[in-house]
């Protein structure tokens, strides 16, 4: 099967034609997101919206028709509580059918769904609920105790409320009392339907209200980058408590009438392969952490077993060539890197569904409907081979939907560009490679070094499971490069100094003579966000504190 050419699709992209083709409603005059992701597929009673794994090892499925009825019941309950258009409704739920019902019912009522990651503590929950003036929280018996420590907590509904020993209202009992008919509340393309918070590493998380016009961009990503086809079986491993999971494991596939898959259990190589086998997954999306973990536990997959994956996608941080090559060798399918943010969705991708030059290690090309560029410190677009801050040219990006942080926490717009805070190398052909966060860039002896490049190179060594690279203050060079390295289980060295020298030589040889880590420290684990990203700011502070000791 020959793929459409990227350049042709990008140059001829027509947002108005796309809207007319994929949406039941209209962004200017009114639409309902539950209609767009559920109702229009519910006429077929056998069409499945969700397959999920049960905690006891069983499995369940929810059809679009069942989701439509349950969403109507939840929307009726919201209306009975005076909750409607524009109000925030939070879900603090594991990956199961109740989560999908809460999302769809909230959207049916014209309200705004607010995800709360189940690993959040009470402080993180309290901040987000207070900031968003959230009107209702839906949770389960496992997470309900966290709400006891939340000041001024809004009313709650609880799945399996009897297990809490509290008088909190039971989710299923409340829904059973409601009608399964509810006329969808219309909103416009400028109205929010999701209330996100960035997982920022500096200061409090910033609010991101996602408007309904983002549906077009979500669709473009699913169609061209993920290449979700009618005959695919799709699993996005990401948790819907975060942007990538909510945008592209829930909204994106359901908008295309495609079943999604939930596995609420902990991510392990064994559970991942069992899930792929059981459901015959053909199209997989996950963070690089997942692929690295699978590669580090290569022995879990029997030699010669072919799982049947057609394509794999990765987002969150750069994939290193070693992992890319391993996926292609062991799973006989390509894995492609995609770039985006909570604010913008995915804007720069390698596209499974389009034909273009695939440059290993690159984040790819501007997504149709977006124009991505790299800017120097004067906010001028850089040329081939130069490093700059990745930015979106707003006027030239009809699918760009971020209008600014919900409560004006920061202004990321300059001269018509949205600044991502990420640094990238411009290849001059429309593609870019990630170089590091703006505040992560290391300047050593006058050279600017992206930590991702060093980390990727260190991962090529068979003994390295993970690495985090930061600047450490140094009198002579301003900064030196320090690497915190996690050794793969079973690969512990007899001589640590010898291994350090091997790793330094590897980086000198594979990257450059000025980019090798002058200090390497072996650690048990790296500090990470709940979504699995390395918290380099923690490592930077650690390296700085070492100077004072």
Image (cartoon, rainbow, N blue to C red):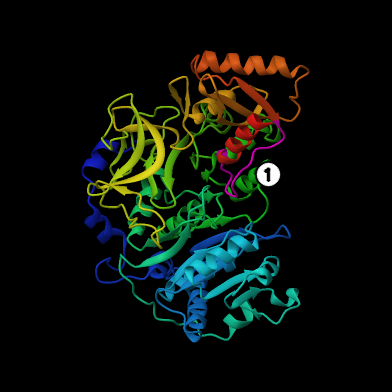
Looking at the image, residue 133 lies above or below residue 254: below
Q: Residue drawn 31% across and 63% down?
A: 23
Check residue 534 for magenta coloring. Answer: yes
Please indicate, yes or no, whether residue 304 appears anywhere in the rendered image: no
State the image coordinates of residue 183 (x, y, percent, origin top left).
39, 81
Q: Residue drawn 64% across and 24% down?
A: 520
Assign a secondary structure to mark 1.
loop
* Residue neighbourhood size for the residue with mark 1, other residues' Cα within 10 Å, grouped as few (<14), some (14–19), many (≥20): few
Which image quarter is the N terminus in?
Answer: top left
Q: Main secondary structure of the magenta part?
A: loop
Check residue 82 for magenta coloring. Answer: no
Looking at the image, residue 271 lies above or below residue 516: below
Across the whole image, how many numbered discs are drawn on residues?
1
Looking at the image, residue 11 lies above or below residue 322: below
State the image coordinates of residue 140 (x, y, percent, origin top left).
66, 69
Q: Residue drawn 50% across and 55% down?
A: 205
Q: Is residue 159 left or right of residue 282?
A: right
Q: Is residue 81 left or right of residue 430?
A: right
Q: Which residue is mark 1?
A: 268
The magenta-colored residue range is 523-536
Which image quarter is the C terminus in?
Answer: top right
| Nearest to the observer: residue 486 or residue 488 | 486
Q: Residue drawn 65% across and 79% down?
A: 170
């Amino acid at each position: 099967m020959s793929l459409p050419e990227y350049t042709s699709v990008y140059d001829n992209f027509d947002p108005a034609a796309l809207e007319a083709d994929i949406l039941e409603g209209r962004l200017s005059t009114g639409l309902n997101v539950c209609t767009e992701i559920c109702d229009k597929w519910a006429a077929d009673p056998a069409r499945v919206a969700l397959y999920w794994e049960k905690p006891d090892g069983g499995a369940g499925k929810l059809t679009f028709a069942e989701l439509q009825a349950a969403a109507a019941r939840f929307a009726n309950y919201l209306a009975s509580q005076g909750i409607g258009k524009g109000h925030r409704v939070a879900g603090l739920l594991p990956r199961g059918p109740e989560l999908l019902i809460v999302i769809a019912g909230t959207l049916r009522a014209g309200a705004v769904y607010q995800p709360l990651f189940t690993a959040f503590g009470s402080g993180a929950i309290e901040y987000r609920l207070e900031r968003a003036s959230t009107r209702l929280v839906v949770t389960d018996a496992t997470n309900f105790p966290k709400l006891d420590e939340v000041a001024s907590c809004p009313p709650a509904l609880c799945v399996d409320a009897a297990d809490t020993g509290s008088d909190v209202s039971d989710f299923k009992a409340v829904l059973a009392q409601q009608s399964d008919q509810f006329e969808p509340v219309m909103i416009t393309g400028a109205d929010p339907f999701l209330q996100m918070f960035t997982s920022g590493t500096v200061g409090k998380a910033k609010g991101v209200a996602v408007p309904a016009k983002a549906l077009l961009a979500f669709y473009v990503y699913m169609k061209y980058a993920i290449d979700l086809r009618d005959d695919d079986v799709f699993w996005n491993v990401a948790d819907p408590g975060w942007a990538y999971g909510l945008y592209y494991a829930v909204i994106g596939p359901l908008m295309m009438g495609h079943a999604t898959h939930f596995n609420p259990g902990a991510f392990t190589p064994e559970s991942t392969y069992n899930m792929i086998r059981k459901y015959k997954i053909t199209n997989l999306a996950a963070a690089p952490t997942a692929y690295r973990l699978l590669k580090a536990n290569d022995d879990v997959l029997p030699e010669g077993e072919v799982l049947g994956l057609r394509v794999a996608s990765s987002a969150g941080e750069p994939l290193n060539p070693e992992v890319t090559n391993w996926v292609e060798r062991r799973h006989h399918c390509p894995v492609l890197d995609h770039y985006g943010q909570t604010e913008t969705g995915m804007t720069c991708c390698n596209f499974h569904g389009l034909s273009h030059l695939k440059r290993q290690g690159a984040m790819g090309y501007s997504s149709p409907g977006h124009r991505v560029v790299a800017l120097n410190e004067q906010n001028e677009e850089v040329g081939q081979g130069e490093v700059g801050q990745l930015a979106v040219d707003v006027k030239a990006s009809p699918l760009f939907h971020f209008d600014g942080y919900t409560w004006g926490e920061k202004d990321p717009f300059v001269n018509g560009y949205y600044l991502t805070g990420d640094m990238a190398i411009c290849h001059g052909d429309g593609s870019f490679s990630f170089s590091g966060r703006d505040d992560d860039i290391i300047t050593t002896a006058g050279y600017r070094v992206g930590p991702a490049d060093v980390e990727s190179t260190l991962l090529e060594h068979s003994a390295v499971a993970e690495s985090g690279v930061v600047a450490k203050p140094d009198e002579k060079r301003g900064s030196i490069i320090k690497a915190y390295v996690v050794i793969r289980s079973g690969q512990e060295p007899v001589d640590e100094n010898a291994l350090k020298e091997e790793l330094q030589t590897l980086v000198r040889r594979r990257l450059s003579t000025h980019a090798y880590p002058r200090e390497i420290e072996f650690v048990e684990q790296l500090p990470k966000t709940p979504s699995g990203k390395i918290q380099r700011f923690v490592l930077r502070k650690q390296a700085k504190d070492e100077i004072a000791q």
